[in-house]
């Protein structure tokens, strides 16, 4: 099967399959694959927001320090291959085909139907095994306890944040969400946590007590990193929230220093130079476009905080597209007040919110336009902003990903294709 046919098969699987949280199904397939997850240590990241950015920072640090490190993240922005990286390079197309075929045979032998995310996760594990990585940095997909990534042999667990998201699966109580995420902490393991709401702290303390884990907590044991500048000077990630994420990454590097030593200068240089596309990314055209994959209220609040030093004196136009199952009302109420005009657009994903549903909320706050597609929405937003204005594209990673090739052209960069 060709790479294109393999990807089409995977996407078709994603469209028709539900979620099955029984990890024993996965272990049956892993046995037939030779248990690749046992061949390397991992840093396992869970949390509502900040997982991907923190994972990218850790990959950058260990790669810069000379380790052979794997990175697994989700979802991707443009290409499936973004999800699996070894040594700074995306997985090759032929490796995707080879691993998926091997997984399909193993699943058939085990009489198991796997989900898209499970196959993607197994593909990463096989690639990391074959590449003989020194360390893997693995981002959970949803929750933690029953997530497919919870098969890895973690030497450290990272809990970046706890907020409300995926409520149909995780519930809407912070305590319950925290319990699902912190359940991945291993006996006598290491937990590094970012800023947490008060309701989550008691849950985390109890898990640490029961496991005997070492716990490093933001605000008590460490703080933000000075390697990332809040105003976004330099090539790295922007915003005060990324300074917090960099603080978490720094604490992880410190916790693992005996096994994976990294010089402080190397660490800080790698943090300052980490790129994570589609996260408060600025495209310096006319108008300027800022793209951010914020997809829930907590992330929208971080985006609003980070936008202040980036907004020019001209008009600010919000291009907003979101999944219907998100708390889009609260997101709009957070972001619309700092904008002069709102453009609502659909996202080319089945779960997309019909922008007409959001019209009443947005129009009650600012002048609003409804577009028939993301591309039409970008055209309308650029026209409304004028040459001296700023367009903020947000609401979903799928919206940013759909528009990303155009945005790269607008800002003079090459798109992340393939």
Image: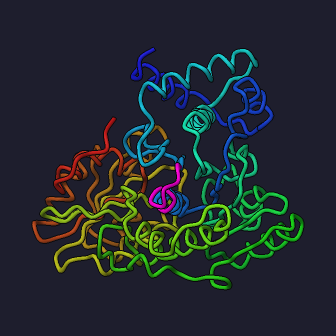
Q: Which residues are magenta?
A: 61-68
Of the pair 161 and 263, the residue shown nearer to us: 263
Residue 216 is situated, as x and y percent measured from the top left of the image, at 70, 75
- Indicate left or right for 122 with 191 as reference: left
Q: Is residue 344 above or below residue 149?
A: below
- Indicate left or right for 62 with 397 as reference: right
- Identify the image quadrant of residue 288: bottom left
Q: Residue at x 25, y 76 (%)?
A: 311
- Residue furthest to the bottom in view is 220
Q: Is residue 201 above or below residue 2?
A: below
Of the pair 133 and 326, the residue shown nearer to us: 133
Q: Residue at x 69, y 40 (%)?
A: 39
Residue 240 is situated, as x and y percent measured from the top left of the image, at 44, 78
Of the pair 290 and 343, the residue shown nearer to us: 290
- Indicate left or right for 391 with 148 as reference: left
Residue 99 is situated, as x and y percent measured from the top left of the image, at 55, 25
Q: Is residue 197 magenta?
A: no
- Residue furthest to the left in view is 387
């Amino acid at each position: 099967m060709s790479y294109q046919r393999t990807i089409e098969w995977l996407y078709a699987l994603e469209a028709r399959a539900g979620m099955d949280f029984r990890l024993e199904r996965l272990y049956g397939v892993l046995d037939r694959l030779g248990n690749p997850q046992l061949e390397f240590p991992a840093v396992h990241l869970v949390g509502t927001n900040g997982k991907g950015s923190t994972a990218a920072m850790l990959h950058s640090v260990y790669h810069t320090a000379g380790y052979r490190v794997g990175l697994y993240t989700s979802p991707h922005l443009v290409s499936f291959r973004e999800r699996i990286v070894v040594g700074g390079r995306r997985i090759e197309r032929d490796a995707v085909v080879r691993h998926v075929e091997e997984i399909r045979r193993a699943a058939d032998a085990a009489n198991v139907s796997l989900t898209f995310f499970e196959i993607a996760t197994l593909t990463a594990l096989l690639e990391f095994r074959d590449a003989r990585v020194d360390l893997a940095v693995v981002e959970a997909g949803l929750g933690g306890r029953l997530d497919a990534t919870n098969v890895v042999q973690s030497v450290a667990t990272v809990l970046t944040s706890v907020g409300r998201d995926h409520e149909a699966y995780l519930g809407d109580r912070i305590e319950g969400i925290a319990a699902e995420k912190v359940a991945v902490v291993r006996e006598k393991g290491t937990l590094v946590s970012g800023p947490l709401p008060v309701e989550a702290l008691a849950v985390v303390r109890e898990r640490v007590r029961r496991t005997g884990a070492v716990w490093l907590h933001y605000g008590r044991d460490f703080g933000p990193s000075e390697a990332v500048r809040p105003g976004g000077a330099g090539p790295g990630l922007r915003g005060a929230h990324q300074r917090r994420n960099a603080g978490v990454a720094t604490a992880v590097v410190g916790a693992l220093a005996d096994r994976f030593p990294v010089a402080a200068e190397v660490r800080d240089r790698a943090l300052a130079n980490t790129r994570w596309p589609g996260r408060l990314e600025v495209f310096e055209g006319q108008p300027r476009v800022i793209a951010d994959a914020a997809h829930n209220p907590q992330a929208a609040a971080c985006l609003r905080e980070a936008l202040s030093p980036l907004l020019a004196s001209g008009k600010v136009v919000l291009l907003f597209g979101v999944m219907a199952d998100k708390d889009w009302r609260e997101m709009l109420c957070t972001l619309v007040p700092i904008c002069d005009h709102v453009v609502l657009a659909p996202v080319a994903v089945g779960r997309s919110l019909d922008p007409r549903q959001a019209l009443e909320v947005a129009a009650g706050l600012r002048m609003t336009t409804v577009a028939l597609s993301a591309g039409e929405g970008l055209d309308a937003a650029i026209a409304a902003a004028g040459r001296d204005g700023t367009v903020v594209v947000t609401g979903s990673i799928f919206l940013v990903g759909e528009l990303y090739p155009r945005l790269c052209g607008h800002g003079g960069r090459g798109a992340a294709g393939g």
